[in-house]
Image (cartoon, rainbow, N blue to C red):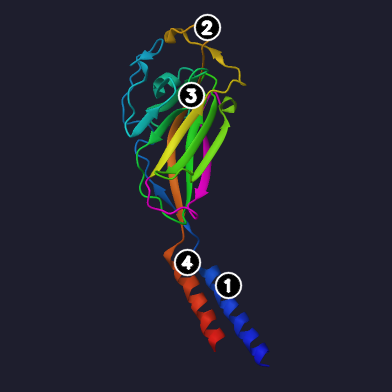
Amino acid sequence: MRNLKRSGYFLGSLAALSVSCLLAPAAHALVITVPNGSFDVDTVPYTGGAPSEGNGYSGAAITDWTKAGGVFDGLYAKTYLATLPFTNVDGANAAFITVTNTSGLGTLTSSNLGAAQANTFYTVTVATGNNGNIAGTYTFSLVEVGNATPIATITGDGSLLSTSAFGDISFSGTTAAIVGGGQLQIVLGQTFDPSTNATDGLGNFGIAPNFYIQQQSFDNVRLTSLVPEPASLGLLGLGAIAMLRRRRA
């Protein structure tokens, strides 16, 4: 009888905990601002005709982003991309990374996005495309500064991207096994892929015929975090307390 009674208490407690879980609101996504995530802070004019530095594109520094590697990284003006035609640009500009068969990884790294939080599910979304030059292998990552293991990363074949419009690529990861505290950063990267049909060196680069380039463009970089609602945690806590009290009784 006593065992049956305890079993009843346990089942009742389990039911209380289950009801708590069912009544608890679902976790919600918080939008984390990515400074200059649409690459529109800097001005890139385009007055028509063949593009050139300062007219349709710019290789100057990009506000809130750090360029590294590659051979030529910068911004395209939306008005120039529209002549290709390449559409679906968010705002006035899009960023690009250019790599070659003789260069290494080219990256654009965001500014600090706030401290990484433990036990948090993060999702990065990047609008990306291939606006004329065959793209190489892309690698996008969400990193915690000071931690060698990315929170989330994705790698893909840039040559399969649309050549007429940007499309979203999303990837996610959790900090459950990572101690929070380091600053978050988003890293957009591209490496040369010799297996794709590389294009011959463009004339305005002034480099010999055995030089090949690959380029990929980016826009509208977004970051969200998924955290439990405070009410959810409270209800789950009440359910757990109820179970402990019943078991002690």
The circle on residue 104 is 3
Front tag of 3 and 4: 3
The residue carrying mark 4 is 232
Q: Position of residue 154 (x, y in %)?
A: 54, 38
Quadrant location, the C terminus? bottom right
For marks 2 and 1, the one nearer the N-term is 1
For marks 2 and 3, the one nearer the N-term is 3
Q: Are marks 2 and 4 in contact (CB under 8 Å)?
A: no
Label 3 packing within 10 angstroms: few (<14), some (14-19), many (20+): some
Quadrant location, the N terminus? bottom right
For marks 2 and 4, the one nearer the N-term is 2
Decide which of 46, 71 is in the foreground and name it: 71
Image side of residue 199 versus residue 73, left or right: right
The residue carrying mark 2 is 209
Q: Amino acid at mark 4?
A: Ser
Q: Amino acid at mark 1?
A: Ser
Decide which of 233, 83 is in the foreground and name it: 233
The residue carrying mark 1 is 18
Q: Up-down: is 179 above or below 58?
A: below
Q: Position of residue 58 (x, y in %)?
A: 36, 20
**Magenta stretch?**
162-183
Which residue sits furthest bottom? 1
